[in-house]
Image (cartoon, grey):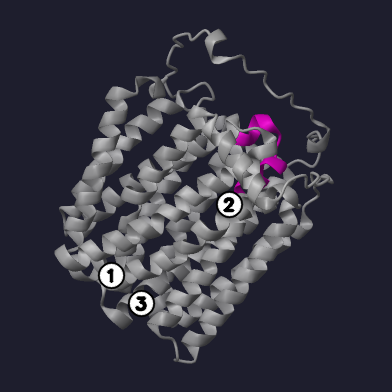
Amino acid sequence: MKGDDTEKPLDTVQVPSPVIPPPDQIVRQRMPVAIPKLTIRHTFRALRFPNYRLWFQGQLASLIGTFMQATAQGFLVFEMTRSPAYLGYVGFANGVPSWIFMLYGGVISDRMPRRTLLMATQAYMMTLAIITATLTLTGVIQPWHVIVMAFLLGIGHAFDAPARHAFVYELVPREHLANAIAMNSTLFNMATMLGPALGGVLYTIIGPGGCFALNAISYLAVMIALKKMTLPVVKPPARTVSAMKAIGEGLRYIRSEPVILSLIGITWIVSFFCMSYLTLIPAWAVNVIGGNAETNGWLQSARGAGALLGALIIASLNPTASRGICISGALIAVPCLLILFASTGWLPLALITLLGTGLGIITIFNLVNASIQDRVDDAFRGRVMSVYSLVFFGSLPIGALLTGAVAEWAGEPIAIMSNAAVALIFGLVLWFMKPDLRR
């Protein structure tokens, strides 16, 4: 990258708030639908900005470690318990703190420097990884230890996620925000592709304790990147109301914005019904395909490869393309792919369907995230993204618990297929009953 980039300091840019007329004065026009087109030369434009480059590099290293640990942890739990339901318990424990702390985390994100908050959450999660590695390497790890550590890690995510989503706004000018969000998805899914495969291989070489130790080291990458950033000094807003009242203000704001409310609803459906299959991948690798830890890693990585491909495609979309067409189409395609996945025990076909599933799910989440960030008032950004994160992370544990219980009772294929059927019905209803979404 050239050293003469002259991006304008973000704290000098004044973006006027839009004046929204009363509903009865709004003239609704039928806008032409823009067909999605790819513009490859703009795919990586957010990386022109030094702060975002640091963020991208640090997050990539850390997230690879995170997914490596998640893959090793899931297989370790299944080895110790041989129970699909126990996999659901771990996912449930990891998500419970989202319901308790996520909204408060959004208030904190709006009230203090987000870099400071992110440094604290990374140090906290690194400490948990060190403890988990120590328990495993000393041979005293038990399934209940994993559940407790998953719960404590969920607390860290509850404060980290809202700040992480909102922090991107401080790294690039507003006109590049959608591309930066897409690049965030790219790095996230590069990690979901590389981390599980690496975790599956390393599990057989250095064991789960070694995977956990490497994850602990990876958190240093983010902390170093945050330390090196040159950010404008942002004066925290005056605390005119209590935290609970601030949360209430954020919820009322979302309720007053129908589009944001609808997008958050889509997030709930996909998180609850289309993401819960992930908790069953270790059991699927052994019980359905007849594989081992390495098979588990390849299945996880196939989903990550598809998500990476989807994120790159979204980053390359023409800015005038209709996000609604992509979201609506993916809401139908993803459940169909999950039904096909649930119908096969052949590894090559399972990998292909998981690749497509990853592509479709990241298309939905990325475009929903970009659409919300595009519309939200800056004063509510942290709180709105905390609700988005709460719906995303809070839905996962309930879905994981339910899916694990159904798998224990009726088998893994029935559990995945039933969830996919519900999501498919929702996608079809949305396609035919809400054509405005496609525009």
- Label 3: state its secondary structure: helix
Residue kind at label 1, given as amino acid type: Ala
For disc 2, the neighbor class at 10 Å (few under 14, some 14 to 19, many from 20) is: many
Identify residue for label 1: 85
Q: Quadrant of residue 159?
A: bottom right
Identify residue for label 2: 103
- Label 1: state its secondary structure: helix
Identify residue for label 3: 77
For disc 3, the neighbor class at 10 Å (few under 14, some 14 to 19, many from 20) is: many
- Would you place residue 381 above or below residue 350 in this image? above
Q: CA distance from mark 2 to mark 3?
A: 30 Å
Residue 18 left/right relative to 4: left
Estimate the x, y position of residue 283 in percent, counting from the top left. 26, 69
Estimate the x, y position of residue 112 in percent, counting from the top left. 75, 52
- Would you place residue 129 above or below residue 377 in this image? below
Query: Circles 3 and 1: CB distance less than 8 Å?
Result: no
The first of marks 2 and 3 along the sequence is 3
Identify the image quadrant of the N terminus: top right
Residue 176 among magenta residues: yes
Query: Circles 1 and 2: CB distance less than 8 Å?
Result: no
Residue kind at label 3, given as amino acid type: Val
Magenta stretch bounds: 164-177
Identify the image quadrant of the C terminus: top left
